[in-house]
Amino acid sequence: MRAILILVLFIGMSNTSKSQPDEKTIVRLQAKAVRAKSYCKKNFLSTRFCVLIDMKIHSGKKRFFLWDLKGDSVLKSGMCSHGICDNLDNNEGHATKFSNVPESHCSSLGKYRIGKRGWSSFGIHVNYKLHGLEKSNNKAFSRSIVFHSWGIPDEETYPFGIAQSWGCPAVSNNFMREMDTVLKAEKKAVLMWIYN
């Protein structure tokens, strides 16, 4: 019954996506997904899906992808913020700096395990703790880097960038509701991979 519910959810989510990534993005996603699937098997993470966030993509375009590891395809894509770092007036839409240093307000690249669901003061008041699995992001939990929603638009704003965060991958309220449903239904921890 659980498998049927997830399948229906995925089909519904696939149908709500108005635009698919371009061919170049799909090729990059597929290359990451091959490595992600192997990593998930080896580390006992969900092998049904993962989250891939491509920071080479402008923030005014969808760059957060829920990837079907079994069907090798995008289930859902959404807008996603990156860390503001120290550049308070930069809204060009490109993430140019990454850091694992506390109080840097930067995004950290690397693989994360999406952890426990908790309360957030932002968006729909839901967040997921992020546990950095690599040297480049192993301070994420102590830095309070979480996956949450905020004032992020649902639709693309390119060539304009979207609001920046203090290092958290933040998405729109509507997208977070969909992701929350998926993450709550999954028994195993899910991989999130932020890359550039």
Image (cartoon, rainbow, N blue to C red):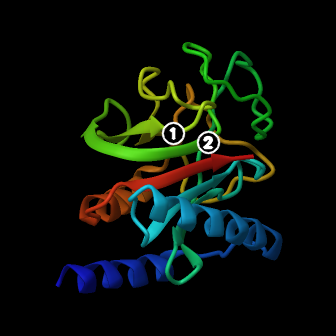
Task: State the residue lying farthest toward the front.
Answer: 42
Q: Is residue 47 above or below residue 1?
A: above
Frontmost residue, 146 versus 46: 46
Q: Is residue 114 above or below residue 89?
A: below
Which labelled disc corresponds to residue 114?
none
Q: In the structure shown, which secondary structural element does the residue marked by tag 2 occupy?
A: strand
Q: Mark 2 points at which residue?
A: 110
Q: Which residue is drawn at 47% across and 60% down?
A: 42
Frontmost residue, 72 versus 20: 72
Q: Which residue is drawn at 63% across and 37% down?
A: 82
Residue 119, percent from left and from top: 25, 35
Residue 37, percent from left and from top: 54, 67
Marks 1 and 2, the one that precedes in the sequence = 2
Residue 6, percent from left and from top: 30, 78
Amino acid residing under circle 2: Gly
Residue 145, percent from left and from top: 46, 30
Q: How many discs appear?
A: 2
Amino acid residing under circle 1: Leu
In contact (CB < 8 Å): disc 1 and disc 2: yes
Q: In which quarter of the image is residue 100?
A: top right
Q: Which residue is drawn at 78% across and 49% down?
A: 56
Q: Distance between the residues labelled 1 and 2?
A: 7 Å
> Does residue 69 appear left or right of residue 3 in this picture?
right
State which mark lies toward you, 1 or 2.
1
Q: Quadrant of the N terminus?
A: bottom left
Q: Name the residue under label 1.
A: 133
Frontmost residue, 189 versus 5: 189
